[in-house]
Image (cartoon, coloured by chain):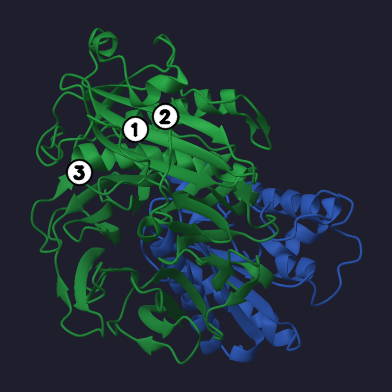
Chain colours: A blue, B green
Amino acid sequence: MKRSTSLVAIAIALILSSGCARRNRELPPQPVSEDATSEANDGMGNEGVTGAVLPGSRGDFLQSVPADRILFDFDSYSLDDGDRRTLDAQASWLARYPNVRVTIEGHADERGTRDYNLALGDRRANAARDYLEGRGVAPSRMQVISWGKERPQVPESNDSAWAQNRRAVTVVPE
Amino acid sequence: MRISWIIAAACSLTLGAAALAQTPPEPAPGQEGEDGQLVVDVTGGRRAALPIAVPHMPTPAASDTPAGNTQALGRQVAEIVANDLRNSELFTPIGPGGLNAVSFPQVTAPDFPYFSTTGAQNLVQGFVQANPNGTLTIGCYLYDVAAGSELTRQGYVVAPRDWRRAAHRCADTIYSRLTGEGAYFDTRIVYVSETGPARRRIKRLAIMDYDGANHRFLTNGQWTVLTPRFAPNQQTITFMTYQDERPRVMLYDLDSGRTRPLVQQPHMTFAPRYSPDSRHIIFSMAVNGNTDVYRVPVGGGAPQRLTNAPGIDTGGSYSPDGARIVFESDRGGSQQLYVMDADGSNQRRISFGGGGYATPVWSPRGDLIAFTKTGGFRIGVMAPSGAGERILTGGGYAEGPSWAPNGRAIMFTRGASSGQLWYVDVASGATRRVPTPLGGSDPAWSPLRE
């Protein structure tokens, strides 16, 4: 757990210091624990992490939730307990910042035809959206977009890459 | 010897503003072609490709044109004709290089004894001539070498910029005369040009002649674009774009270069296809995770929902008579092919093999439906009844078939993260790569140009 926590902190630091990770795609997938984030903030002493993180900003969101994304099984859009815990944390954060609107991106791995994957990405984004709505996030605050297989997280053709590419990402504005 | 021409109004063709007039030359005495027997077997298995001589084409007077000197054009036209015929897999061209030069007077009086020594069964001759009004005349003659007779002839008067089209039309004429089938060389491909890393791939609409010539980009790459299709009337291209981060179907007007959304909807629209009369488009729309097939008039109007099963219904394609639509659905648990009437009624499953089926496309001849078999990602065909499934491509990720207008060849995407365009001959299964300047995906083959 400690190691994963450090990875998260490093990744967040890289994103914040580079200032160019428009869609948070530098994050490793699916961190492990919910209390990781409190430690992430004081970790490593990297510039940017302990600097000014505006409440309600993307940086705040990324530090406050276990992950900005949930991952799916092949050709599936169902949520498991871990996904629900991640989304619960996202919903809690969104409840603290009711003016923040988010985009939920749905993605698929490359093992599907282009059009089908667009539809599948839409299913995944909506699965996350529907759960967040059930946790009190107003539908008007959430927009979904499917990228199908057009924006892989890991552009490789193996099980690990595919697992990270089958995702729904909650994107908070910078 | 002077070759004279008769302009046959009934046969004249128009090419937008540029005239591509078809002017059959006056038959030369004693060279009437025999109507007749098919010399190429195109229905069953493959026979040996037909040897056909294609010598360089002379010019009556070498002169410079905006397309180059007529002498050089004569060589290039012959090369294009030979290349087209070779691409079809049905012919083995002999020449142009290595053949005896043909003089202008010999165009209508071939040296049959010489060509019989080359092993050719047929012979294509022609010429390129610059006209006083700035146009080019390209003559095209097909002969039977053993019989020493003419089979057909065509003349094309074109603007210099359209000289390649005249060469393709010559090849189309020869192909049709010798196979008895429609041709496909005077056609274009619209596709998605790809470059850059997979995570931020730049995808631009691009259009080119079927052989890769006259390539140009239609969009600038700012927004990802996917799955373009020609309107059958070739005035418009429909495609999907992420413009303004709102994924939806757009229409691109080929004359003006302007685009407009097909429908005004808050939901993602994608997978567009024209009806055969160019008046409707069927497309998919994802509403809260449920994707169905809809139909809308090209000019606008309320979309009509054609499918309503829970799940993903997408990838529709009209039958050539416009009466039916084939689409894919996972309503039964896996992706399978279904056929329905054009109004959405009478939906029935046609694919039952192992693995999934996707991206069905009805052949222009109506006899086959091409598809992507999702287990292994190969291109195959089956009858509209679902019978006679046949896989055409071997290893290597393939998806997204598009038919040549005569239904004898299919172009498709090969490669998952970095795509290339490939071609497969439906009868033989022979494949070859279609050259593009960058990577490519989602090819769509135009109908024969008019």
Residue at 13% x, 50% y: name it.
B389
Say whether disc 2 or disc 1 marks the residue closer to the N-terminus: 2
Taking the image as shown, residue A153 lies to the left or right of residue B372, namely right
Q: Which mark is residue B126?
A: 2
Mark 1 — residue?
B141
Asked which secondary structure carries label 3, the reply is strand
Residue placed at 59% from the left, 47% from the top? B159
Whether residue B447 is visible, yes or no, is: no
Q: Earlier in the sequence, mark 2 or mark 3?
A: 2
Chain to which mark 2 belongs = B
Q: Nearer the viewer, mark 3 or mark 1?
A: 1
Q: As rendered, which of B428 and B5 lies closer to the eye?
A: B5
Amino acid type of the residue that numbered disc 3 sits on in the rendered structure:
Ile
Q: Report crowding for label 3: few under 14, some 14 to 19, many 20 or more residues within 10 A (C-alpha).
A: some
Are the residues at dot 2 and dot 1 in contact (C-beta closer than 8 Å)?
yes
Real-space CA distance between mark 2 and mark 1, rounded to the nearest whole angstrom:
6 Å
**Residue B145, percent across and down?**
22, 20
Q: Chain of mark 1?
A: B
Q: Alpha-carbon neighbours of circle 2 within 10 Å: few (<14), some, or many (≥20)?
A: many
> Considering depth in this image, is B183 or A111 the residue closer to the camera?
B183
Which numbered disc covers residue B391?
3
Q: Give the answer, above or below, for where A56 lies relative to B208.
A: below
